[in-house]
Image (tube, rainbow, N blue to C red):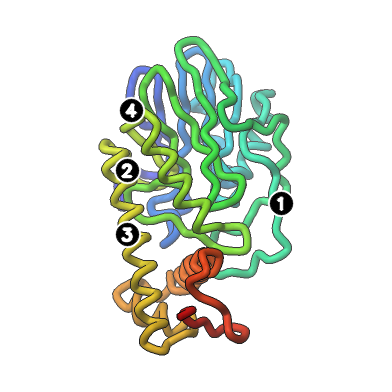
Amino acid sequence: MDARPPGTIERLGPALRRVLAPNPSPFTFSGTQTYIVGTDTVAVIDPGPDDPAHVAALSAAVRGAAVAAILCTHNHRDHSPAARALKAATGAPILGCAPLALAEEGYATDEAFDPDHRPDRVLADGATVQGPGWTLETVATPGHTSNHLCFAWREAGALFSGDHVMGWSTSVVAPPDGDMAAYMASLEKLLARPEQLYYPTHGPAVANGHGHVRGLIAHRRARERQVLDRLDAGEGRIPAIVADLYRDVDPRLHPAAERSVLAHLIDLAGRGLVREEEEGRWTRIA
């Protein structure tokens, strides 16, 4: 875990700072990391939870600068809610991911969607936001959520990767909105891009982005094979599959793991490799 106290304004470079929110958990690691790009004119990336102490820390961090944009990679509650308070304090527009609120929010993670997310402008793949010395290019990366975006900092050759790529953990892919096929395609998309330095919203920076992404792809393919092996062994119910495959993982993460296994099964079904015989029981297609 991170030794930094929440609210610390950490300078990562001449035009990059990071502020840690006070929301550590098994799903957020040390907490949400909000990035501030620029000097006199700045962009704020993933403002985080609507926590008064965190909003105060962000306001202090941008004091004296013009805030050109507040960017959200996606609207989970640990990423987007503070955008509204920061907009009220600075007048900056909220840009980035599209609004998204699901009827089904009951899966057991702390990442429920922020239903009040209302951006001033949704950014399409390839759209840019600019300020003195910085250009942020939108990179659509659906999978973790259908509206997930990354932001490439052209001048620095870096990528703000949100929850799509993290250094401390794999991303949760939770249906109905999370989509494993889209997630894998989005990982492949990053391999075609030049950035190698990734700044995730949770956890440490990733210095070898392409190597790390290849590792994530290999991990997911290995997990897919393990799921198929369990089906071949006659075990077709997700809780039992998770109990076997994730037996060394914190049990608090098992509900999220069940959603990821479901995402794998939905992907495999779409490829004609498995089917759901009855509600909650899956089998291989011979």
Element under label 3? helix
Q: Is residue 163 visible?
A: no
Badge number at residue 12: 4
- Which residue is identified by label 3? 219
Q: Nearer the viewer, mark 1 or mark 4?
A: 1
Specify which label sits upstream in the sequence, 1 or 4. 4
Residue at the image position 41 percent from the left and 89 percent from the top: 234
Tell how many labels. 4
Rounded to the nearest angstrom, the CA distance separating label 4 from label 2 is: 12 Å
Amino acid at dot 1 = Pro
Q: Is residue 162 visible?
A: yes
Amino acid at dot 3 = His
Work out whether 286 lies above or below 35: below
- The front one of 48 and 175 is 175
- Which residue is identified by label 2? 204
Q: Nearer the viewer, mark 4 or mark 2?
A: 2
Quadrant location of residue 152? Answer: top left
Specify which label sits upstream in the sequence, 1 or 3. 1
- Report the side of 256 relative to 76 (left or right): left
Find the residue positioned furthest to the front: 286
Badge number at residue 115: 1
Residue at the image position 54 percent from the left and 30 percent from the top: 138
Element under label 4? strand
Mark 4 near mark 3, Cβ–Cβ under 8 Å? no
Mark 1 near mark 4, Cβ–Cβ under 8 Å? no
Specify which label sits upstream in the sequence, 4 or 3. 4
